[in-house]
Amino acid sequence: MMQYLALIYETEETRSKLSQTQQDALYDEYRKLIAELGGKLIGANRLRPASTASTIRVRDGKRLVTDGPFAETKEYLGGYFLIEAADLDEAIQIASRIPAARMDCVEIRAVVPREQAVARS
């Protein structure tokens, strides 16, 4: 099994167009999906709005902190699902069930196991 990170990208416009009833129904879909995934779901969280982000850069030993997201964009990272799947095909199948995929987009990336990430050549 491999781990995959499903990055949920949203636009503020998409969410603002939903009525409270539609938002409640959407959250119900998320809760149902989370329950159905069981052990395949390692973690999932919604993130605070991009306007609350801080971007940190360190150059020549000096830290620069900027309020807001890294780039000016209409889409922002709104949340994630960390899942276990046998392969990319299964990860795509799971990601396609994430409600945000119908309104905005979900990006899938394989997670490099920690042992490999810190291994030295």
Image (cartoon, rainbow, N blue to C red):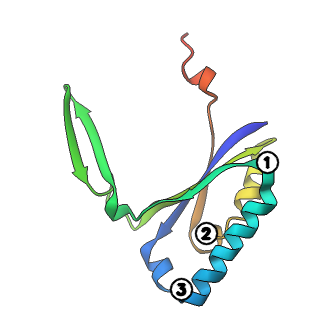
Q: Which residue is mark 2?
A: 100
Give the amino acid type for the residue marked by disc 2 in the picture: Ala
Label 1 or label 3, whichever lies nearer to me, is 1
Q: Which residue is mark 1?
A: 39
Q: Which residue is mark 3?
A: 18
In-image side of 68 versus 77 (left or right): left
Report x, y in % for residue 46.
53, 61
- Residue 81 visible to the viewer: no
In-image side of 99 versus 7 (left or right): right
In-image side of 62 versus 32 (left or right): left
Counting other residues with Cα less than 10 Å from the Cα at mark 2, is it few (<14), some (14-19), or many (20 or more)?
A: many
Give the amino acid type for the residue marked by disc 3 in the picture: Leu
In the displayed structure, 63 sits above or below 77; it is above
Label 1 or label 2, whichever lies nearer to me, is 1
Mark 1 touching mark 3, by CB under 8 A?
Answer: no
Q: CA distance from mark 1 to mark 2?
A: 21 Å
Report x, y in % for residue 31.
70, 68
Mark 1 touching mark 2, by CB under 8 A?
Answer: no
Q: Residue at x 79, y 42 (%)?
A: 87
